[in-house]
Image (cartoon, helix red, strand yellow):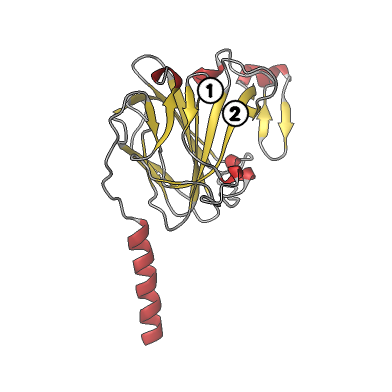
Amino acid sequence: MPLLGVFCLMIAVFFANFWRDPDRPIPQDAGILVSPADGHVMFVRRERANGRRPSRKEREEGNIEHDEHTGDWYPKPCEKPLSFETEQRFVASEGTPQDSDVWRIAIFMSPLDVHVNRAPRAAEIVAMEHRTGKGKRRGPFAPAYRKESEFNERVRTVFEAEDGERIEVMQISGALARTIVPWKGIGDTLRRGERYGMIRLGSRVDVRVPANLYQSLVVSAEDQDPNHPKGQFIKAGSDIIFKRILEEE
């Protein structure tokens, strides 16, 4: 019984730690985006869209590409890729940079991190969609630190600022995380750093922004920096991940 009591106490402490939601100082600088999640930066990559989720009409026409890991794709991106109208297929950007390229930052959230997610900038939520992954009712749940986890069960949210600029944030479940809980919805206007949802237990959050407008300010695990072997640890709402290029010129 004493051992059972100690075990139950340890479980209670773990979940109390997991559910914590500390206040954060929100930077007031102009032209910045703050981190939407606590965790280590897995990678920072320049990407380009080369496909999108098909509409019903496109499915009927039959020009669909199927991937066993990621599902069905129509082999053309959105007419305006930076509108993020639907989920798009992104690949590494090669050759001459294009205005439609994006920067993607992937943040790994361990079970010990704060799991409340915050808005990267002051904006309105104009799209929010839930995808289960690989056509399953729920799942799959690959470990969040693996590349394949980007197609786990996920919630994609598009934020639009007053000037019409859009960014995309993807809340992704992990091997332990099985529930993504949005606290806001389409039409809600948020302040920079305002809470908008959480993911229960270990997980991942990806952010995509226009590459021609922003530069990254974080160190990723792929940089192999000896000071940040797992990638820079950043905190939701308080650490800056992107800064507008025009602000420096």
- Amino acid on which disc 2 is placed: Arg
Q: Is residue 52 visible to the viewer in this orientation of the structure?
A: no
Residue picked out by circle 1: 211
Is 198 placed left or right of 132 in the picture?
left
Q: Relative to residue 205, is residue 201 depicted above or below? A: below
Q: Looking at the figure, which quarter contains the N terminus?
A: bottom left
Question: What is the secondary structure assignment of the residue under circle 1?
Answer: loop
* Numbered-mark total: 2
Question: What is the secondary structure assignment of the residue under circle 2?
Answer: strand
Q: Position of residue 178 (x, y in %)?
A: 49, 51
Place residue 97 in its image quadrant: top right
Place residue 159 in its image quadrant: top left
Which of the marked residues, 2 or 1, is nearer the chain's N terminus? 2
Q: Position of residue 123 (x, y in %)?
A: 34, 24
Q: Nearer the viewer, residue 140 or 76?
A: 76
Residue picked out by circle 2: 46
- Residue displayed at 36% across by 31% down: 185
Q: Position of residue 119 (x, y in %)?
A: 36, 34
Q: Position of residue 146 (x, y in %)?
A: 62, 48
Q: Mark 2 and 1 residues: CB-CB less than 8 Å, in contact?
A: yes
Q: Alpha-carbon distance for marks 2 and 1?
A: 7 Å
- Amino acid on which disc 1 is placed: Ala
Instruction: List the single residue furthest toward the bottom.
Output: 1
Q: What is the crowding at mark 2: few (fewer than 14 residues within 10 Å), some, or many (at least 20)?
A: some
